Image (cartoon, rainbow, N blue to C red):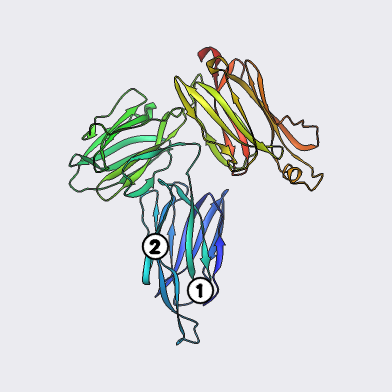
């Protein structure tokens, strides 16, 4: 048999298609089509080809659908060493069977078949995260396989499914809104959920769980009048299944209670700073809903305004939502560049800590700025992007040549907090300054883009100071 060679496909936006080649012994090779910035990249693992190979495709309806789980077997395959020496058989351990599951609840056929002395495996991210890359080893055949999973979008607030840990993970993604909810009830539990989403003029339905004996109840939203779900209440029974659900809307309406409530085991899906439910996620089995979570988006309504993010166009979008005020700013920096930002917000008496945006693993310097409760607020954010010409071989100056955020200042009604007081005239090129400010407004939230290496964009939400 040929020598095994490790491979790592890296990380992409999503997977468009998988093509499996299989023979009488199981999986021979895999061809996978990724999407990155709109471009399709095709990679292959396993070199075996020939008339004995059957090739089958499984296509993902990108970008609304994505792979959430890979299941399969790994074991001994009894394959011939070559077409000429048919008698020289070789036992090798390879991937013998594969099956894919998606966020839309679809499951591919089983490709290949279990080999001798097979071991089952399951590759799955946490709570419906999407497949973004494969790694493993291959030679003539696909010998080993692992996977990288990532969150669907940092611009959404993804609330973890509440309930039991069993069942198949799914994530419906994000849509313009929700038109209808249909709940199946059986034996005092929620046995199925059916969500009818809106995307432009389309109606897209996702179903999870199923029971032929269930009783179905419907809650319709006045979608055309702008109604949307703002929160979900529910309970979990002693066996870890969702037993009841109530949906609350932006028009101060509530659905009836679906299922049967259980005392002392309640959950509530309502994130602070994010107002509109745009998709559900969770776990389910054949006739039960094991857990339910949701994806929420920001709703920008007067008097709040969203100021466009400034910076480069690379990286993943993120959004901290809209709050009452900013309480603390944490910035990490190094190599004359801003690496990451983290914001702590105030919402009434509650404190909300946002995620770190940018390179959270870099060991660099760090600055923390704590604002004076609600008496101090940010009125503008300033800085510049640029790169510096290489002047020596030192590590710090080498890193500083990359095009990144080189200065970041937060101006409040009381003082100014500066990170990296670099001057654009001190050897920087391709300088792009920015200033985020709205007269007589204060900043109540941040959004932008970031990569694993640095902060790429920063934008803000503002609202009038008198309305604060």
Q: Is 30 situated left or right of 280 in this image?
A: right
Name the residue: 19% across, 44% down: 214
Q: Is 191 situated left or right of 14 in this image?
A: left
Name the residue: 82% across, 44% down: 391
Observer-nearest residue: 354 or 35?
354
Observer-nearest residue: 135 or 369?
369
Q: Mark 2 points at which residue?
A: 72
Number of numbered labels in the structure image? 2
Question: Looking at the image, is 13 positioned above or below residue 276?
Answer: below
Name the residue: 36% across, 56% down: 107
Give the image quarter of residue 222: top left
Mark 2 surroundings: few (<14), some (14-19) or many (≥20) residues within 10 A: many
Q: Which of marks 2 and 1 is in front?
A: 2
Question: Looking at the image, is 371 positioned above or below residue 29?
Answer: above
Looking at the picture, how far across and down is residue 285, in whole percent?
29, 49
Q: Is 119 situated left or right of 444 in this image?
A: left
Looking at the picture, how far across and down is residue 178, in whole percent?
37, 35
Who comes first in sequence, dot 2 or dot 1? Answer: 1
Where residue 48 is drawn, which disc sits there?
1
How far is disc 2 from disc 1 in space, using C-alphas? 20 Å
Give the image quarter of residue 464: top right
Question: Looking at the image, is 24 positioned above or below residue 32?
Answer: below
Observer-nearest residue: 131 or 31?
131
**Residue 437 showing in the rendered view:** no
Where residue 367 is drawn, which disc sits there?
none
Q: Is 263 situated left or right of 414 in this image?
A: left
């Amino acid at each position: 048999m040929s020598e095994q060679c490790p491979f790592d496909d890296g990380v992409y936006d999503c997977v468009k298609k998988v093509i499996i080649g299989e023979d009488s012994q199981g999986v021979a090779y895999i061809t996978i089509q990724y999407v990155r910035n709109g471009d399709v990249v095709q990679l292959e693992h396993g070199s075996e080809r020939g008339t004995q190979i059957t090739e089958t495709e499984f296509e993902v309806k990108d970008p609304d659908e994505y792979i959430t789980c890979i299941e399969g077997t790994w074991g001994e395959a009894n394959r011939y060493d070559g077409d000429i020496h048919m008698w020289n058989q070789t036992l090798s351990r390879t991937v013998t069977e594969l099956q894919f599951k998606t966020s839309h609840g679809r499951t591919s056929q089983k490709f290949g078949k279990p080999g001798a002395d097979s071991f089952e495996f399951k590759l799955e991210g946490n709570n419906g995260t999407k497949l973004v890359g494969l790694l493993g080893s291959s030679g003539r055949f696909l010998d080993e396989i692992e996977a990288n999973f990532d969150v669907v979008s940092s611009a959404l607030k993804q609330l973890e499914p509440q309930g039991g840990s069993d069942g198949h993970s799914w994530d419906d993604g994000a849509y313009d809104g929700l038109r209808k909810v249909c709940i199946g009830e059986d034996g005092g539990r929620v046995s199925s959920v059916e969500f009818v989403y809106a995307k432009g003029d389309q109606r897209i339905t996702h179903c999870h769980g199923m029971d032929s004996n269930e009783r179905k109840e419907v809650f319709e939203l006045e979608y055309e009048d702008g109604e949307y779900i703002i929160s979900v209440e529910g309970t979990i029974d002693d066996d870890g299944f969702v037993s009841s659900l109530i949906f609350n809307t932006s028009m101060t309406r509530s659905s009836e209670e679906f299922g049967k409530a259980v005392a002392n085991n309640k959950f509530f899906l309502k994130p602070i700073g994010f107002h509109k439910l745009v998709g559900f996620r969770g776990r389910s089995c054949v006739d039960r809903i094991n857990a339910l979570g949701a994806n929420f988006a920001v709703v920008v309504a007067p008097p709040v305004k969203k100021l466009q993010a400034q910076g480069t166009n690379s990286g993943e979008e993120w959004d901290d939502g809209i709050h009452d005020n900013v309480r603390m700013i944490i910035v990490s920096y190094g190599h004359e560049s801003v690496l990451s930002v983290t914001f702590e917000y105030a919402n009434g008496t509650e404190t909300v800590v946002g995620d770190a945006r940018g390179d959270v693993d870099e060991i660099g310097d760090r600055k923390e700025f704590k604002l004076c409760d609600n008496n101090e607020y940010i009125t503008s954010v300033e800085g510049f992007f640029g790169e510096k010409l290489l002047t020596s071989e030192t590590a710090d100056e080498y890193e500083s040549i990359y095009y990144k955020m080189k200065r970041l200042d937060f101006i409040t009604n009381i003082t100014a907090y500066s990170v990296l007081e670099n001057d654009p005239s001190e050897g920087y090129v391709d300088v792009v300054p920015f200033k985020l400010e709205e007269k007589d407004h204060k900043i109540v939230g941040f959004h932008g883009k970031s990569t694993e290496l640095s902060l790429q964009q920063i934008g803000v939400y503002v609202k009038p100071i008198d309305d604060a």
